[in-house]
Amino acid sequence: MRESRVLKKLRAGEIVSCFKINFSDARVSEIAAISGFDCVWTDQEHIGQDWSILAASIWATKAHDTDLLVRVPKGSYSDFVRPLELDATGIMVPHIMNLQEAEAIVSMTRFHPIGRRPIDGGNADGAYTALDFNEYLVQANRQRFIIFQIEDPEPLEELEEIAALDGYDMLFFGPGDFSQGIGAPGEWNHPELIAARKRVAEVARKHGKFAGTVGGPGNVDELIAMGYQFVSMGADVVGVKNYCQDLVGAFTKSASAGSKNSYMNT
């Protein structure tokens, strides 16, 4: 089983970069991998990517030794394990609300002796049965990561207990939904949001878990100082949108000046 680049760096105390993909085209995942990101984040919670697209993104990133993270929808156990069987390097489960839910997800996504994840072994992650059965279970538990998203105020009541739970790797703070949950949508500097972001990082590290969140060039230093070791630095849609707006802005400025000069010369 391919070694996880994300886990290798995190376990060595290094900081991991991630890039979110919204477009349903594996070539975008490959561009992000070629650019040097440690991890590419695809999404099945909000984006209707079918399994063939997801599989293609996994192949594209593996070719460049880049991990692929899938944010899964909150559904049945099949929704959780199928990306792993396609050989995604990790999954992120959104909106973890309490300890009981976290325990159930660990049970569904980890093999013995940690959990009771359903076993196949005939898919890409098991090398299509070429990987020894028991070695497959060991490597899947060791080289594939599970992330819990903390993006609501409710789980903060049991955050210590959730962080202490064995069998998963990272707590990921989601500021967008959290801001909505506290009744302050989009107020990124709201004191309650800032306090929660700091607390998630502190509690994760206290209990031997890694801490992740979204960020960007403007605040990545602050997030690292806060204790975050995994930072999603941006998204394809943001980059394309900004590039298009810059081009249109430059064109409009030049076209306006050109029209003015043309009028004055008539």
Image (spheres, rainbow, N blue to C red):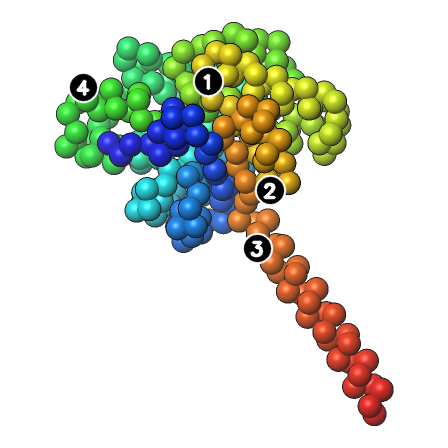
N-terminal label among 2 and 4: 4
Q: Does residue 71 appear to the left or right of 153 in the view shown?
A: left
N-terminal label among 4 and 1: 4
Q: Is residue 99 visible?
A: no
* Residue that badge 2 annotates: 217
* Residue that badge 4 annotates: 134
N-terminal label among 2 and 1: 1
Residue 241's image quarter?
bottom right
Identified by mark 2, the residue type is: Pro
Query: Whole-Å distance between the Cαs marked 2 and 1?
Result: 24 Å
Q: Does residue 44 appear to the left or right of 175 in the view shown?
A: left
- Judge depth for marks 2 and 3 and give the one in front: 2
Residue at 59% across / 34% down in the picture? 221
In front of the other: 29 or 117: 29
Query: Whole-Å distance between the Cαs marked 3 and 4?
Result: 45 Å
Tell me residue 68's x, y (percent): 39, 38
Asked whether disc 4 touches disc 1, contact meaning CB atoms under 8 Å apart, the reply is: no
Q: Residues within 10 Å of mark 3 (few under 14, many from 20)?
A: few
N-terminal label among 3 and 4: 4
* Residue that badge 1 annotates: 209
